[in-house]
Image: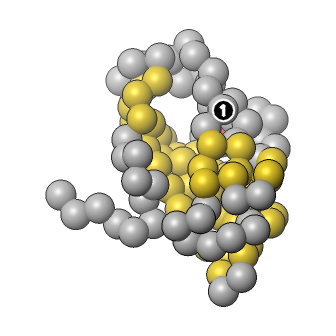
Amino acid sequence: MTVSIREVVEGTQRQGADEGVAYQVTTTNWASTPTSPSVVVYRTSDETDVTSTVMNPNSPSVATDTITLSPLDSLTAGERYRVELQFTATGYSPAEVYFFVEAE
């Protein structure tokens, strides 16, 4: 399987359906000093945008080159989710990276 350069290096994450995890993404591999982060979460089985259900509130924050996402929670066991993060940085308007979460 080919890995996209936009996919985070850590690859697919595993998370319990009843856990809440605030993922962090370091943008140094793409660009420094990110601003204006925004997140969308898709359930991959039907490509439905489930952001308002699984990431509420959706308020990512930035500290230097690290973007901290709001906790991802209320997942459905057995589903796979694609978390897409867009941000603005020098040379990118916007940049977009993503990772997958397997709910257990």
Q: Name the residue under label 1.
A: 22
Residue 82 seen: yes
The residue lying toward the viewer, choosing from 98 and 29, is: 29
Q: How crowded is mark 1: few (under 14 residues within 10 Å), some or many (20 or more)?
A: few
- The residue sitting at 54% across, 48% down in the picture is 83
Q: What residue appears at the point 67 percent right and 76 percent down from the top-left corner?
A: 94
- How far across and how far down the image is residue 60, in percent? 77, 47
Please identify the quadrant where the C terminus is shown: top left
Q: Is residue 50 left or right of residue 93?
A: left
Q: In this view, does 6 lie above or below 103?
A: below
Amino acid type for the residue under numbered disc 1? Ala
Q: Quadrant of the N terminus?
A: bottom left
Q: Which colour scheme is used?
A: secondary structure
Q: How many marks?
A: 1
- Secondary structure found at label 1: loop
Q: Residue furthest top?
A: 18
In this rendering, position of residue 5 left or right of residue 68: left
Res 19 → quadrant: top right
Residue 49 visible, this orientation:
no
Residue 32 in percent (x, y) is at 68, 70
Residue drawn at x 63%, y 21% as measured from the top left = 20
Q: Residue furthest left?
A: 1
Q: Which of 24 and 39 is in front in this view?
A: 24
Rendered residue at 37%/46% (across/down)? 11
Q: Where is residue 2 in the image (x, y as percent from the top left)?
A: 22, 63
In the visual, does 27 lie left or right of 104? Answer: right
Residue 102, image x and y in percent?
A: 39, 31
Q: Is residue 51 above or below residue 76?
A: below
Q: 32 or 93, which lies in front?
A: 32
